[in-house]
Image (cartoon, rainbow, N blue to C red):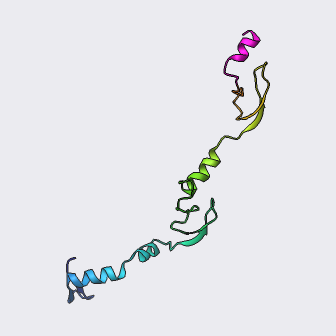
């Protein structure tokens, strides 16, 4: 760092601080905790929304821990994948010859056991 000149209110030179001394003062006062405090956030302990483990929140909006869970994915990815998953409902196969009950999403029509797409068209004569 460069040397710093300190002046009084009248504009007279009061002190000259060497670059080495300025550097030491700077690194003595500036640390990562001081930087976070100056940004208005010191962090806090919270409970993970997915796994329930306590973690240190680095931002005000953080609700998931960053550790890897046994599946090898982060808690946030697991939570949003489950939230986005298509709900399964009990349905009856649309094939007239089959009529098996199965679990599928709302758009699925065939049980695929062994029914396939188009088999009911032949049965209905379409």
Which quadrant of the rendered structure holds the C terminus? top right
Q: Residue at x 63, y 45 (%)?
A: 84
Magenta stretch: includes residue 117: yes
Most foreground residue, 21 or 88: 88
Which quadrant of the rendered structure holds the N terminus? bottom left
Specify whether 58 is left or right of 22: right
Magenta stretch: includes residue 51: no
User: What is the residue that sits farthest to the front in this orientation?
Assistant: 114
Residue bounds of the magenta highlight: 114-126
Q: Dividing the picture into quarters, in which one does residue 104 lie?
A: top right
Residue 124 in the image, given as x and y percentages of width and height = 76, 12
Query: How many numbered discs, if any?
Result: 0
* 107 shown above or below 63: above
* 22 shown above or below 70: below
Q: Residue at x 54, y 56 (%)?
A: 74
Residue 125 in the image, given as x and y percentages of width and height = 74, 9
Q: Dividing the picture into quarters, in which one does residue 11 lie?
A: bottom left
Mark yes or no: residue 4 visible.
no
Residue 70 in the image, given as x and y percentages of width and height = 57, 57
Residue 31 in the image, given as x and y percentages of width and height = 38, 77
User: What is the residue that sits farthest to the top in this orientation?
Assistant: 125
Mark yes or no: residue 71 visible.
yes
Specify whether 81 is left or right of 32: right
Specify whether 58 is left or right of 107: left
* 42 shown above or below 59: below
Most foreground residue, 26 or 98: 98
């Amino acid at each position: 760092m460069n040397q710093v000149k300190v002046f009084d209110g009248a504009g007279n030179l009061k002190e000259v601080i060497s670059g080495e001394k300025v550097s030491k003062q700077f690194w003595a006062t500036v640390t990562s905790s001081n930087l976070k405090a100056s940004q208005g956030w010191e962090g806090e302990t919270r409970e993970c929304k997915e796994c329930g483990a306590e973690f240190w929140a680095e931002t005000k909006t953080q609700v998931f821990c960053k550790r890897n869970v046994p599946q090898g994915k982060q808690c946030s990815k697991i939570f949003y994948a489950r939230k986005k998953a298509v709900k399964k409902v009990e349905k009856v196969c649309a094939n007239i010859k089959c009529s098996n009950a199965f679990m599928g999403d709302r758009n699925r029509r065939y049980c695929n056991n062994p029914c396939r797409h188009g088999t009911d068209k032949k049965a209905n004569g379409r």
